[in-house]
Amino acid sequence: MSSDNANGPQIFEAAEKRDSAAVAVEPEPEPEPGTDRCEEYTQIKPYAGMPKEVLLLYSSQARYRVPREVLFWLTVACTLTLLALTATVIALSPRCLSWWQASPVYQVYPRSFKDSDGDGVGDLTGILEQLDHFQFLNIKSIWISPFYRSPMKDFGYDVEDFRDIDPLFGTMRDFEELLAEMHNKGMKLIMDFIPNHTSDRHRWFNLSRIRDPHYEDYYVWTDCSATSPKPNNWVSVFGNSSWTYDAVRGQCYLHQFFKEQPDLNFRNPHVRQEMTDIIRFWLGKGVDGFRMDAVKHILEATHLRNEPQVDPNKPPESITSEWDLHHDYTTSQLGLHDLLREWRAEMDVFSREPSRYRFMVTESYDYHEVDKTMMYYGTPLVKESDFPFNFYLLDLPHNTSGMWVQHLVHLWMANMPKGQWPNWVVGNHDKPRIASSAGQAYSRVINMLLLTLPGTPTTYYGEEIGMENINVTDSQIQDPFAKFNKSASRDPQRSPMQWSSNTNAGFSSKLNTTWLPVHPNYRNVNVEVQKQDEGSVLAQYRFLNTLRQTELPFQRGWFCYIHADANVFSYLRELDGHSKAFLMVLNFGKQSAITDLSSVPELPDQLKVLMSTNQVNNGMVLQRSRILTEAGEGLVIQYSTPTRYNPNHPTQCYVSEKACYLEAIDILYKC
């Protein structure tokens, strides 16, 4: 049989089936007029893989289109709401605290902090070796006293080269390594800037004394006699005449400090530019701020008239002390604040770098003229220093009473311009240690005051362990000022830091003599020993600093006086909307005292001690009508109450920038 005949029946059957199918599928009828094409598929449900024509027909149906549009506009509305909420939160949130507000400032005196090379003098590498100490204390802001190249006639405050490191402290590479490691650990470095004067070995002075045309007027010169070099009665801070005759130039130069520290002439625009360039140099290195030294002395009156005597009847030839004169012509002269604001503007240029704000603090001892000190804050329109140092707590030892302490605190708070940030200093390299001047029994309560007041506390190295002054014999004197006036020696407060019970208190590992003697109590008063004692000065300092940085009422809250008497100073720290508040009861008197606060209805009847400087009283429950403190004891009392003290006592309460707390969602907002 042929292949054609064999396939014939199959071909016939296929054709028959095709014809049957053609008969079964009738032509699609045309829709009636007015009928929606979508109704053609109403009997068919959407299915996977459907052609786009079918998909488009379904997507246009109301039951699919409406939910889709609802979801779209709901998404738009939610997005806009979130944007609005974000903008509202940003607009209502108070500004964040800067690094110089959040952490205490810790002053390092480099000669005395840590000796790394065994020569008996501290150095930059020694500071690097002890950075863990700052981390242990949760301190982020470190101010290091001068380490510029210097003949050391005033231990670094007589600068020979503003752009170099003195070999005594190390090298520029040591500095850069220290700065880099500090930044790696989240710390900030504040340098001393010394604008008023240079060393008499500075290149500028050597050129000025030979009348180099460019440098001739870099310093304050005037005609005088070699036999009697006193153009007027101006007196140095360190005593005797402010004028010294220079035989090379044949004139006298002004020095408001030692004769080895000639005053720069800031009436000369070249001098102003030189000092501005030095600021740029160190900011370019990466330093985070400057402490501006002795700023009130920067300008002097050009007329060089005699200053008025405090006692007009005193013979003029007996005028030898700065306290004998009213310094109308040598301090706080017109133009001073313009100069400081120029430097502030330069620092603001470098502050544009994200998270690299550059800090500026000014040093000016204005004593009873507190209004002059407050001018360093600047004005609402022109920024100056972030704050001037507040030295009024240095007078704590003059009177041991709660009322005296309140007076000193109020002196600053009542005169500080509205919205500015306060600060507190109880010791530095020029003043006796507070543990010696006030008494060791009061060192703990003074630290408690320092760390619970509003604003930025400043801690001089060793205050965190209660270091005291040393006794210095005549043969041990290092301070040039002491050679003029032994009673004014600054050596006692500059002794080596007490790290451990080892040789030289752990300050120097070598047996060589340290530049100043170590205090004899170093075997018991040192960092290593106090780290092991939960009730030590160091442990309490660390606890209080942690409390200050973790509890909002201490960071952003109100400060309110509630009581002061012959022994006790008491105040509140509270924040509107925050359930927690803190009561401080500090006994600065010479005897125990019972404080009755029953007249303060905002306080609960029962109060629990969070921390006492006398460790055995931690956790004690007290009645507000009977709060017992021993002499030198301080209490931190935490309580909770819905009623705040500040609304009803506006004259007793202060806050730099008012903020409120919304506890339900844990945010701060402007209120």
Image: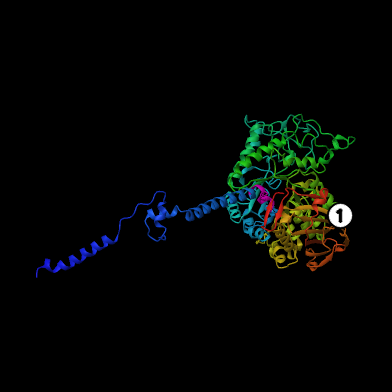
- Quadrant for the N terminus, please: bottom left
Residue under the image location 64 percent in, 36 percent down: 204
Q: Name the image quarter holding residue 59.
A: bottom left
Q: Is residue 171 magenta?
A: no
Instruction: Decide: few, some or many residues near mark 1? Use Cα within 10 Å; few <14, some 14-19, many ≥20.
Output: many
Q: Is residue 217 left or right of residue 452?
A: left
* Furthest residue toward bottom: 1
Q: Is residue 186 left or right of residue 311?
A: left
Residue under the image location 47 percent in, 55 percent down: 64
* Furthest residue toward front: 32
- Secondary structure beneath label 1: strand
- Name the one closer to the observer, 89 or 183: 89
The amino acid at mark 1 is Ala
Image spot of residue 142 (x, y percent): 67, 52
Q: Is residue 59 left or right of residue 645?
A: left
- Name the one closer to the observer, 101 or 217: 101
Does any portion of residue 194 appear in the rendered image? yes
Image spot of residue 310 (x, y percent): 86, 37
Q: Is residue 98 magenta?
A: yes
Q: Name the image quarter holding residue 294.
A: top right
Which residue carries the number 1 mark? 564
The residue segment tinted magenta is 90-102
- Name the one closer to the observer, 516 or 664: 664
